[in-house]
C-alpha cells in the first residue's frame, strides 16, 4: 500500500513535535487494529464450522505481521505465513514485531516478500485478507482471479476470512476523527467516483501538542458492496456467509458478529465475510 509520512514542520531550533517523534505504524495499530478480537473471531468461527482447531494460517497483505504474531502466540501448534509486496513495512514488522517473539515462536512464522497474485504456498487451514486490503484489486476479473488462487491455497476444509465496510457514508467524501490515548486518528475519504467505484483515502494523525502527521497512509481502492463480494466469492467456488456486527443498547457495535442475510441500512457498518471451501 502506498504511504508517506508528511509531518507538520517545527521551527528551526525548536524541540521536535510529537508528530516528528511518532511512529506511523504504531499509531496505525493503536487506532485501527485489534488483532486479539480479530483472531478470537477467526479461531472460534473456524472451530464452530469445522469442529476442529485450525493450525495453519496465511496472512495476505500482512503489513507489519501483527495479526500473525497474535496467531502463533495462541497455540504452540499454530504456524503463519506472512505475504506482502512492501519490503519496507515487512522490515518494520521484523524489527518491531517478530523481534519481540520468543525464538520458538519465530520459527513458526514464515515471511514472504511477494505478490499475492503469484505466490504459491503449502495448503493452509485459513487465509486472511483483512483491513480491506484486497480492495486494492480494483477490477472484478482480477478480484475473482485472486479469490480462485486462495481457493487453491486452502486445505480441503479451509476457510477464507475477509472484512468489508459500507453504508451510505462509505460513498461520501468526508473526514472522521477518533481520539485514542496517544493521538487523534483521522480517516479521510478524500475522493470517490460513483462511476468507477474508486475511492482515494488517507489516514492522518493529530497529536496533543497540535502537531500533525498528514497522509501517513494513502489508499486508492474499489469500494466493493457485499452483494458484489459474495457473488465473486461464489464464482470462485466458495460458499460465502456475511457475519454482521451486533449492537449494544446504545445502538453501537459490540464486537459480536453472527451470520446475517439482511443486515441494516446503517450510515456506516463493518462486517466479516467467511468463505468456506
Image (spheres, helix red, strand yellow):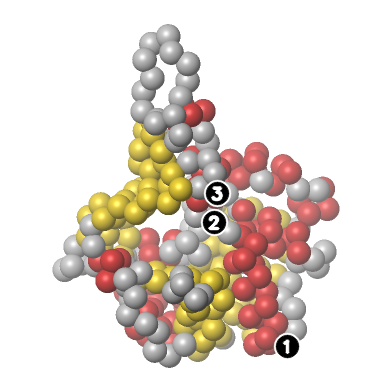
Quick one: SS at disc 1?
loop
Q: Quadrant of residue 261?
A: bottom left
Question: Which residue carries the number 1 mark?
Answer: 51
Quick one: SS at disc 2?
loop
Mark 3 Cα-neighbour bin, 10 Å: few <14, some 14–19, many ≥20: some
Q: Quick one: 26 or 50, which is closer to the camera?
A: 26
Residue placed at 43% from the left, 82% from the top?
A: 233
Q: Are marks 2 and 1 in contact (CB under 8 Å)?
A: no
Q: Are marks 3 and 1 in contact (CB under 8 Å)?
A: no
Q: Report x, y in % for residue 44.
A: 67, 78
Residue placed at 70% from the left, 70% from the top?
A: 56
Mark 2 Cα-neighbour bin, 10 Å: few <14, some 14–19, many ≥20: some
Disc number placed over residue 30 in the picture, else none: 3
Residue farthest to the left, as pictured:
195
Residue placed at 82% from the left, 64% from the top?
A: 76
Whole-Å distance between the Cαs marked 2 and 1?
A: 28 Å
Placement of 2 over or under 241, stated as above or below? above
Question: Which residue carries the number 2 mark?
Answer: 33
Disc number lying in front (2 or 1): 2
Among numbered discs 3 and 1, the one appearing first in the sequence: 3
Q: Quick one: 82 or 265, which is closer to the camera?
A: 265
Q: Report x, y in % for residue 102.
A: 81, 48
Confirm whether residue 59 shows in the render: yes
Q: Quadrant of residue 47?
A: bottom right
User: Which quarter of the image is occupied by the C terminus?
Assistant: bottom right
Q: Are marks 3 and 2 in contact (CB under 8 Å)?
A: yes
Q: Report x, y in % for residue 109.
A: 71, 56
Residue farthest to the top, as pictured:
13
Residue placed at 39% from the left, 31% from the top?
A: 210
Amino acid at each position: 500500500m502506498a504511504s508517506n509520512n508528511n509531518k507538520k514542520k517545527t521551527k528551526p531550533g525548536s524541540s521536535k513535535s510529537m508528530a516528528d517523534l511518532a511512529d506511523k505504524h504504531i499509531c496505525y495499530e493503536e487506532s485501527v487494529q485489534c488483532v486479539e478480537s480479530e483472531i478470537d473471531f477467526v479461531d472460534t468461527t473456524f472451530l464452530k464450522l469445522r469442529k476442529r482447531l485450525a493450525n495453519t494460517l496465511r496472512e495476505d497483505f500482512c503489513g507489519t505481521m501483527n495479526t500473525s504474531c497474535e496467531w502463533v502466540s495462541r497455540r504452540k501448534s499454530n504456524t503463519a505465513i506472512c505475504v506482502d509486496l512492501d519490503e519496507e513495512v515487512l522490515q518494520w514488522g521484523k524489527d518491531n514485531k517478530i523481534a519481540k517473539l520468543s525464538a520458538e515462536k519465530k520459527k513458526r512464522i514464515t515471511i514472504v516478500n511477494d505478490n499475492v497474485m503469484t505466490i504459491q504456498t503449502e495448503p493452509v487451514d485459513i487465509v486472511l485478507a483483512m483491513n480491506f486490503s484486497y480492495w486494492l484489486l480494483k477490477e472484478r476479473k482480477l478480484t475473482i482471479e485472486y479469490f480462485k488462487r486462495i481457493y487453491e491455497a486452502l486445505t480441503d476444509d479451509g476457510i477464507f476470512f475477509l472484512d468489508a465496510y459500507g453504508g451510505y457514508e462509505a460513498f461520501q467524501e468526508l473526514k472522521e476523527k477518533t481520539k485514542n490515548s496517544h493521538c487523534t486518528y483521522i480517516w479521510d475519504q478524500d475522493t470517490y467516483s460513483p462511476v468507477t467505484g474508486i475511492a482515494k483515502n488517507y489516514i492522518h494523525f493529530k497529536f496533543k501538542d497540535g502537531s500533525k502527521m498528514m497522509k501517513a497512509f494513502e489508499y486508492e481502492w474499489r469500494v466493493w458492496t457485499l452483494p458484489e463480494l459474495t457473488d465473486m466469492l461464489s464464482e470462485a467456488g466458495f460458499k460465502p456467509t456475511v457475519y454482521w456486527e451486533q449492537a449494544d443498547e446504545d445502538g453501537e457495535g459490540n464486537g459480536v458478529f453472527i451470520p446475517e442475510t439482511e443486515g441494516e441500512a446503517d450510515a456506516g457498518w463493518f462486517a466479516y465475510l467467511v468463505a468456506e471451501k
